[in-house]
């Protein structure tokens, strides 16, 4: 399965029609034998692949609520778009579902603390790590670089 992440914004501009040639980025998935189709559920795409019918591309449309970096206040994202996506926050939605299922405040607080600790540990590990060798910049990239 190929998951295409689509955050609805570029680095400092909203991603509107004039900035891209197609309405759904998944349609640009030329590496699958069948054109990408945006499905209602990832489950269907996984079943498609598991049934041996080949890869399926799914576009995950979301909105980055904050900017790309500390200096980016994301003022280029229209307020109405930000408000619409605030109601679709996956973390808040999951918390609501867990509460419906009877998960209490103590358990949710434990998950938050564990997540914050994991992020802090990962950040500390990254800051302790040596910088990568610039010669490895293109390692693991699917497309071969253009000839020099």
Image (spheres, grey):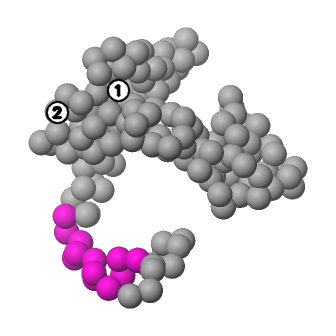
Quarter placement of the C terminus: bottom left
SS for callout 1? helix
Asked whether the viewer can see residue 35, the reply is yes
**Depth-wise, is mark 2 or mark 1 nearer the camera?**
2
Q: Residue 66 has which mark?
A: none
Mark 1 crowdedness (10 Å alpha carbons): few <14, some 14-19, many ≥20: few
Between 39 and 87, the one lying in front of the other is: 39
Between 90 and 2, the one lying in front of the other is: 2
Q: Residue 109 has which mark?
A: 1
- Seen at 68% across and 29% down, the residue is 40
Mark 2 crowdedness (10 Å alpha carbons): few <14, some 14-19, many ≥20: few
Is residue 109 shown left or right of residue 88?
A: left
Looking at the picture, does residue 49 appear above or below residue 37? below
Between 106 and 27, the one lying in front of the other is: 27
Quarter occupied by residue 81: top left
Asked whether the viewer can see residue 111, the reply is no
Q: Residue 125 in magenta?
A: no
Looking at the picture, does residue 73 appear above or below residue 35? above
Marks 2 and 1 sit apart, C-alpha to C-alpha, by 28 Å
- Seen at 25% across and 64% down, the residue is 126
Q: Position of residue 12 (x, y in %)?
A: 24, 41
Give the residue pinned by disc 2. 73
Who comes first in sequence, dot 2 or dot 1?
Answer: 2
- Seen at 81% across and 45% down, the residue is 48
Quarter occupied by residue 84: top left
**Magenta residue span:** 127-138
Q: Position of residue 103 (x, y in %)?
A: 50, 19
């Amino acid at each position: 399965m190929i998951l295409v992440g689509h955050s609805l914004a570029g680095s400092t501009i909203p991603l509107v029609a004039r900035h891209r040639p197609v309405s759904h980025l998944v349609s640009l998935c030329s590496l699958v034998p069948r054109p990408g189709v945006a499905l209602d559920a990832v489950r269907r795409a996984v079943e498609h692949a598991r049934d041996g019918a080949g890869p399926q591309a799914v576009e995950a449309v979301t909105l980055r609520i904050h900017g790309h970096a500390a200096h980016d206040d994301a003022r280029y994202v229209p307020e109405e778009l930000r408000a619409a996506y605030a109601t679709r926050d996956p973390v808040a939605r999951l918390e609501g579902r867990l509460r419906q299922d009877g998960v209490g405040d103590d358990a949710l607080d434990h998950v938050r603390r564990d997540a914050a600790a994991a992020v802090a540990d990962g950040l500390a590990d990254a800051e302790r790590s040596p910088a990568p060798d610039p010669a490895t910049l293109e390692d693991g990239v699917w497309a071969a670089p253009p000839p020099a």
